[in-house]
Image (cartoon, coloured by chain):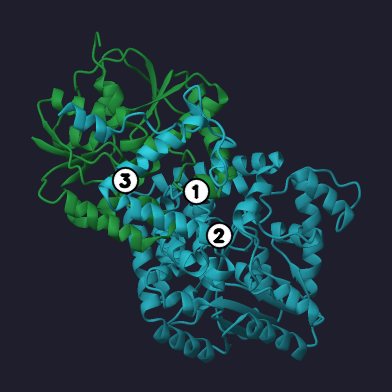
Amino acid sequence: MRVALFITCIGDTVTPEVGRSTVAVLERLGHEVDFPAGQTCCGQMHINSGYRAEADRLGERFLEVFDGYEVIVSPSSSCVGTMRELHPQLRGRLFELSELLVGELGVTDVGASFPHRVVYHPTCHSLRVTNVGDAPYALLRAVGGLELVELEAERECCGFGGTFALKNAETSTAMVIDKCAAIVASGASVVTAVDSSCLLQIGGRLSREGAGVRTMHLAEILAQTAGA
Amino acid sequence: MSEAMAPFPAAAREALTDAQLRANLAGATNTIRDKRNRVVGEVPDWQALREAGRAIKADVLAHLDTYLVQFEQAVTAAGGHVHWAPDAAAANQVVLDVARAHKVDELVKVKSLTTDEIGLNVALEAGGVHAVETDLAELILQLDGDWSSHILVPAIHRNRTEIRDLFRRTIADPAVSDDPRELAEASRRYLRERFLTARMAVSGANFAVADSGTVCVVESEGNGRMCTTLPPVLVTILGIEKLVPTFSDLEVFLQLLPRSSTGERMNPYTSLWTGVTPGDGPQEFHVVLLDAGRTRVLADEVGRQALHCIRCSACLNVCPVYSRTGGHAYGSVYPGPIGAILVPQLIGIENAPTLPFASSLCGACYEVCPVMINIPEVLLHLRAKAVESAAKPSERFAMNAAGWIFNGRRRFAAAARLGRLGQRPLIRRGRIVRLPPPLSSWTRSRDLRPLSGESFRDWWARRR
């Protein structure tokens, strides 16, 4: 299958390893990945901050750049969910990575190996906007050597919320402190999710606390192979 | 509720420093949340019920003019009096006029958010009439000059030791202990005397039936029913959005409300009355139909769904913001997610421009709302209005600049390169730990991952 990759602005500039991992997993499964170079940002930051006109322009740009691609994948549930809500014509075309793998391609075992204790944080948008369901869990359970542990109050928000993390920094911090406490209590050495933005928030706090737990996007774990 | 309020971020910051408050809130909201989840889980057609609730409310709002007139006729035919109040002052004046007509200087009140919204107690006091709150939590707050921080559990921010001390100072024996039974007994003695002597009562309403003129109040203590049955004169303040078309529509809401609100299968005290019944209950009954900004909300196609709200408070209990800041930070009698979308619409976005931003958009509120109010959708809608009305010039500039940069791949790539250069002096051991304002509000409590040395697109280009 030919798949267009939507990398997202954060994925392009801050966490390119997530995009590289996404490419690695899809190519390992025999798919062809294309990267339309005109892509930038989906406009979610603008919508969430109240700047509709800018967001509309970026949305239009997205539709033009990805015009002609039958299947688009992104390693960000938040951007995918937002774009599908704003542009219903993207439903059935634009997928979050775990949705594409499990729901569309019918794969749970992607041939990954990662012998570590991992905890999964189901991000709010993946749960309630993009509705990725059990797909990330199914993928993680099929990873060789991986021990998936439970996260207390897993459905609680990490406190990122885009510009919320700045505008209401203290409230956002109170939320991420509780999230990090639950992560540490899980005994995992790695926390994973399907949104790099939430992982920046969680990872930023874990790093500040010196907690010794790493953040890794789901795609990165799926890209790991035995002996790699 | 008419002046501009303190900005949410500052009020929240202060609330967050109160460790006791946070512990009280976390405990209380978790308990109610678990109860709610248990009893909602028992109802196999819950989603269909929610949809029914939403549909009934949407129909009421679409034909509100018809239903209101129908209600007025039904109440009048049943011996009641109907007053139309465009704003808080008009509604308060009706209550005061009725009190004066009966030479009443003290009245009893059923727990009512609507009367808190319009500042009824203060207006009555100014007119020489003392209103006694009879809901236990409302009484506690009134005795202490405090105000509600939760729709359902107004004194959620107080613990029983504080209440014991307050009762000792005010209505109880100085020897009263903090045993809940003793505290309840003390308040019962105090309130019974008021119920038996009061000559007038004021209530809000949870629902009102358009075709019969029936008013419905749901409560847990029975004190509300004391108010609606014992005093000879009763005035009900009714927000115009509280109507339902027919009696059988109550069936839907009396299932949705208790399970969402208190986590009970059935509401303990459901009082329903229609006009006046000779020889039974109040012999003079007034209904004040209150607008106070509601028709303005109704005019907004996206925002009007906030008027579906049945005040269950499920959205407060699941909200990660509310459960940490408490209700006072929202600066209104309607706190939490519903307050964040209702209040700016009722009083004008220019008077509450920070409330729509008091959310991480996690969507937990929408998930539990028994009448399917898409709170995140309305929050975004109101954020756009807030930006139009009062965005900081610096923020507007930054957002416009970001929009311009994102709207061209070369600009975007160039900005990323510039950022990589600019961040160099800030990176310590692979992390950015301190940034200038406004980004300092991130780095005060969290490290920041720097921009990557090589962007994905550069890697992709190199790889080809």
Cα distance in 3D space between marks 3 and 1 = 23 Å
Residue A109 visible from this viewpoint: yes
Please state which amino acid type lies under the numbered disc 1.
Phe
Asked if both marks, 3 and 1, belong to the same chain, the answer given is: no
Cα distance in 3D space between marks 1 and 2 = 11 Å
Q: Chain of mark 3?
A: B
The residue that label 3 is drawn on is B412
Q: Chain of mark 1?
A: A
Cα distance in 3D space between marks 2 and 3 = 30 Å
Residue B411: percent from left, percent from top = 31, 48
Mark 1 element type: helix
User: Residue shown at 81%/54% (left/top)?
Assistant: B186
Please state which amino acid type lies under the numbered disc 2.
Thr
Asked if both marks, 2 and 3, belong to the same chain, the answer given is: yes
Vertical side of B34 occupied by B75: above or below: below
Q: Chain of mark 2?
A: B
Q: Which chain is green?
A: A
Q: Mark 2 or mark 3: which comes first in sequence?
A: 2
The residue that label 1 is drawn on is A164
Q: Nearer the viewer, mark 2 or mark 3?
A: 3
The residue that label 2 is drawn on is B354
Mark 2 element type: loop
Residue A171: percent from left, percent from top = 57, 44
Going by the picture, which residue comes out furthest to the right?
A: B174
Mark 3 element type: helix
